Image (cartoon, rainbow, N blue to C red):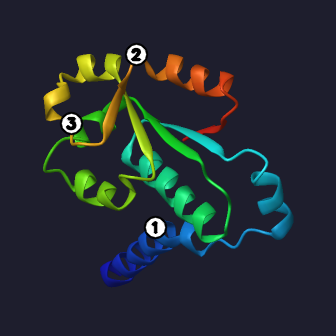
Amino acid sequence: MKKYTFLLLAFCFVSVSTAFSQTVIKEQTISDLNKNPNYAFGVRDADGFNSALGMFDALSENGVSIENFEIVVKGPIVKELVKGSEMEKQFQKYKSKVKVSICSIAMKRLNVSEEELFDGLDIAESYSIRLLQLQALGYSYLIY
């Protein structure tokens, strides 16, 4: 029984981690999405962060025009965005393509200093203010 449980969990993990990269977006949807090439994603955990990166891959692979793609971060994941972390290694692929803004309030609450963050991350006044700013600038946005 344990063997089957492990296999089922492994399958679910692989399915979730590759779900976005296997997404085929319809031509009409691509045409609609190309009307606004600016995207923002609000996240608070590793699953949300990975989902946003997966969305970047899916949009890119399907030929959707992306001028600006920003992930705004708050919550527990802030502690994972530090030098030497697995998240730093994962983010290297996206460093020049995806902007990540970290909520300064979350940094204070979680006791994470700017010096601890890995390179390529920006600090925002707050999660909410940054998302409102991006909305005011016309970004399409989702909260994960």
- The crowd level at tag 1 (other Cα within 10 Å; few <14, some 14-19, many 20+) is some
Q: Earlier in the sequence, mark 2 or mark 1?
A: 1
**Residue type at the position of mark 3:** Leu
Q: Mark 3 points at which residue?
A: 117
Picture coordinates of residue 113 (x, y %)?
17, 25
| Image point (80%, 69%), residue name | 26
Disc on res. 17 = 1
**CB under 8 Å between callouts 2 and 1?**
no
| Image point (54%, 57%), residue name | 56
Disc on res. 125 = 2
Residues 7 and 134: in front is 134
**What whole-number distance in Å separates the C-alpha atoms at marks 2 and 1?**
31 Å
**CB under 8 Å between callouts 2 and 3?**
no
**What whole-number distance in Å separates the C-alpha atoms at marks 1 and 3?**
25 Å
Residues 76 and 104: in front is 104
| Image point (30%, 58%), residue name | 92
| Image point (64%, 42%), residue name | 38
Picture coordinates of residue 144 (x, y %)?
54, 41
Picture coordinates of residue 55 (x, y %)?
56, 57
**What whole-number distance in Å separates the C-alpha atoms at marks 2 and 3?**
16 Å
**Residue type at the position of mark 1:** Ser
Vertical comparison of 58 with 68: above or below:
below
Vertical comparison of 127 with 59: above or below:
above
Query: If the image is split into quadrants, where does the N terminus sit?
Result: bottom left
Task: Identify the secondary structure beneath mark 1.
Answer: helix
- Left/right placement of residue 108 relative to residue 122 reads left
**Residue type at the position of mark 2:** Glu
Q: Earlier in the sequence, mark 2 or mark 3?
A: 3
Q: Nearer the viewer, mark 1 or mark 3?
A: 3
